[in-house]
Each structure stands twice: as structure tokens, then as C-alpha cells.
Image (cartoon, grey):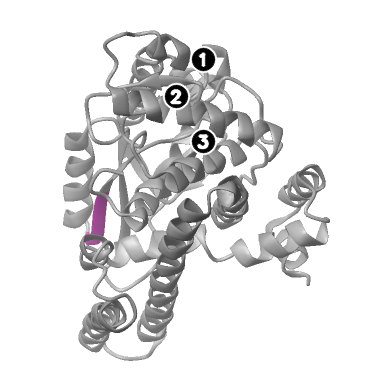
Amino acid sequence: MTTMSAMSSALMRRGRRHWRLLLTALLAVPLVVLGGCAQLGYYGQSLSGHLSLVRSAQPVDDWLAREDLDPELRQRLVLTKSIRDYASVELKLPDNDSYRRYADLKRGAAVWNVVATPELSLQLKTWCYPIMGCAGYRGYFKPEAARELAQELRREGYEPYVYGVPAYSSLGWSNWMGGDPLLNTFIRYPEGQLARMIFHELAHQVAYASDDTTFNESFATAVEQIGVTRWLSARPEALREDEQSRARQDQVQALLKTTRDRLREVFQSTASDDEKRAGKAEALATMRADYERMKREQWGGDARFDRWVQGLTLPALAIQGSYTDLVPDFIRLFEREGSDWVRFYAEVKRLAKLPKDERRAALARR
């Protein structure tokens, strides 16, 4: 995955839900009813950016027919064909045109997302959109626009964070245009991470709850985890490498959860703002010290997550939980449904239609 760690790519994926929903809204609602010049400009760049991305994609077989194709890229594209077929045949994920085309965007990210929290809160700022409802991030096809919004939010007293997103999904709405494509931004990921990306994005085309980011993302993460273990089962060496990476990523995620819990205690206390600022700084410093100790004492100095952990901010921590908090519940649900993908998906779809409180209670049932 070039120089990005598995954890870093996971963070970049945090904003994909925004783009899935945004494209749903754009394809369903004419821009003229969205209202407001700023909104029109935002939706306009979103739609034009997506259309440009889709138009640049060509079928994988067309790329493979090129005699001058880079040998490494050829190998990766051949691999994606096997992964994509496995996703539909074995994991019962949608069999459509998504991830059967490839585009080289000539840039390092598909889009750039902005997330923000108040200085002393883990509550993400939200932006609301037609049909899709509200989301805790806002994305742009040009990094300059994302940074401009971040500066505006900082002036308003928020703590913003801008990050590149390697891929996004349109929830299947783009299949009539050729589907969501494979991109240069993730095509060179290690095999396990590449498979995760494809399985995760396709899972979002199976079920979606309009009011529950954590439900949606944890579901897709559970699918990718189970799917990748099965995909790599015939390649023990690759499976061991992926499991080690996943185990260390899980350790980091556990550390982040502990840090979020500490921060919530600080922010919800009756302390003064200055005391809360000191508590916030202490919690973040403890997180980084605990990470360094874990890396040194348990990982033999493995530094793959260094850049990501050192760059964590309050909004970055806030967006993390949605991808992991409900994963154990979904894995238990998969097992309760006899490890049958069709039955599992049917139950997830049923839960997605329930009110949020009922949905969470049903999912938590053991």
C-alpha cells in the first residue's frame, strides 16, 4: 500500500460513507432544489468530480490487453479479478460492475475529507444533505477546498482534521455508469488489504441504515474481516502476515478506545476548561507513550503505525469508533445465522429498517 500503513488506510476510508450517501442524493435530486449558492457549489463539485472519476475508468480486461502495461500493475489487476469473483461467488456480495474497471487518477487520494470537533468534545460536527441525512464529515475532490473549509472551521472554534480517502462507494448507484472503479490509490495494497477494501465497499451495497454510521461501517468491517480470513486460507504465509497486521491494528484500536473513554471522562467532568485542556493533553500524551511502549515491548520495534498514531487529533479519534465498536456483535450475528451469508445479510437488512435503539438492542443480543 505504498508507504501507508494498514491503520492509515483505515483512517482514510473513514470518509467513504459520506461519498456513498452524497452520490445517492446527487443522483436522486436535481441540483436546482438543493438551495443556496454555497450548497450548489459544493454539490456541483461533488457531482462533476465523481463523473470525471468514472469517465477515466476502463475495464480491467482492456488494461490487461495493453502490451506496455507495467508488470506490477498487471499482476495487481489480475489479482483483483480473482478477488472480485470470490466476493460474489463465495461471500455472496453483489455481482455487478463495481471494481471491474480501473482508473489512474494521477493523484494520491480519491477525495479529501474534513472532520471537526469542538476543542473539548468528541462530538463530530455534522453536515446535512438531501435524502442521505446528516454525516460527520464533508469531502472534496480538491485538497485546497478541504483545507479552506478546515481554516474556516478553525476560525469558528472547531478543531479540524483533513485526510485523504483512497476510495469511496456510491452504494451501487453508479453501476449504470460502469460501477465504482478500482483506483491507483489502493491498487498496490498488500493482498489482504486489497481484498479488505473490495469486500468492505461491496458490503455497503448490501445493507444500509440511514441514521447509523457505526452500524453501517461495523457491518462492512465484519464482512471484510471474515471474508479476508477465508480468502487467504489457502495461502498460509499471506494469512499469517495479514493476521499479524490485523492483531496489531486491533491493539492500536483498543488503545484508541481507552483514550476516547479517558477523554469523555475529562470532558464530562465538572472541571474548568483549563483543567479539561490539561486533561486532554495528558490523555493524548499517555496514548502516545503507551503506543511507544507497546511497539517496543511487544512488537520488536515495528514502526508501521508511527506516522498515523503521532498524527492523531481529537476529530481523528472521534471518527475511529464507528468502524470497530459493533464488529464483535456482527460476527456473533454471522455465527448465529449458521455462518450463512445469505441469511446473515437478510438479518442485517431487517435490522437496518428498525428504529436505531431497537436495532442496537437486537444486534447486541447474544
Which residue corresponds to mark 2?
Answer: 181
| Front residue (pair 304, 317) | 304
Q: CA distance from mark 3 to mark 2?
A: 17 Å
Label 1 environment density (alpha carbons within 10 Å; few <14, some 14–19, many ≥20): many
Using the image, tell me which numbered label, if any, was put on residue 178: 1
Give, as a three-letter code, the residue at label 3: Leu
User: Pointers 2 and 1 in contact (CB under 8 A)?
Assistant: yes
Which residue corresponds to mark 3?
Answer: 21
Q: Is residue 194 above or below residue 29?
A: below
What is the x, y in percent for residue 11? 36, 53
Residue 36 sits in which quadrant? top left
**Residue shown at 42%/73% (left/top)?**
251
Residue 346 highlighted magenta (yes or no): no
Give, as a three-letter code, the residue at label 1: Gly
Label 2 environment density (alpha carbons within 10 Å; few <14, some 14–19, many ≥20): many
SS state under label 3: helix
Q: What are the residue bounds of the magenta stretch?
A: 157-162
Q: CA distance from mark 2 to mark 1?
A: 8 Å
Q: Which of the two discs, 3 and 2, labels the residue nearer the N terminus?
A: 3
Q: Which of the two discs, 3 and 1, labels the residue nearer the N terminus?
A: 3
Using the image, tell me which numbered label, if any, was put on residue 246: none
Q: Is residue 356 left or right of residue 120?
A: right
